[in-house]
Image (cartoon, helix red, strand yellow):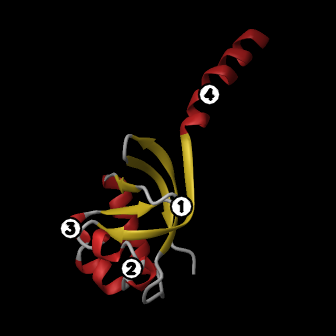
Amino acid sequence: MRQLLLAAVLLSLPLAALADSWKGVPLLDNNCREQAKADPDAHPTSCALKCADSGYGIYTAEGRWLELDKAGNKAAVAALHGTKKADHLRADVEGTLKGDVIQVRSLSIPD
């Protein structure tokens, strides 16, 4: 029984190690990401929603652009509809990074 429990714990470790999180990162649509890179906090919510079909991504603290997967794009639209912010769209994202794409588990825009 102990060996089975130990095996289960060891097998779950790599999955936990693959989980990543980004806190307070700029959330931008793909259409506007280059224009807004210099000042992402000035990018308005209305524009981010208007450009929803282009998909979304985040800039990391190191300036790296990471795209969101399909589930992340849906979560971004929901969060944008739910926020009271007119701009300064900073998101908290949890998921798994695969190349330059985040497989999003959760995304929120804290008020």
Q: Amino acid at mark 2?
A: His
Q: Earlier in the sequence, mark 3 or mark 1?
A: 3
Element on which disc 2 rests: helix
- Please tell me the numbered disc located at residue 37: none
Find residue 79 and report its horizontal and vertical position in percent.
43, 72
Mark 4 crowd level (few <14, some 14–19, many ≥20, 10 Å Cα): few
Residue bearing mark 1: 61
| Neighbours of disc 3 within 10 Å: few (<14), some (14-19), many (20+) | few
Q: Mark 3 near mark 4, Cβ–Cβ under 8 Å?
A: no
Q: Residues within 10 Å of mark 2 (few under 14, many from 20)?
A: few
3 or 1: mark nearer the eye: 1
Residue drawn 45% across the image and 81% down it: 41
Residue depicted at x 42% and y 62% = 58
Q: Are marks 4 and 1 in contact (CB under 8 Å)?
A: no
Q: Nearer the viewer, mark 3 or mark 4?
A: 3
Residue at image mark 4: 12
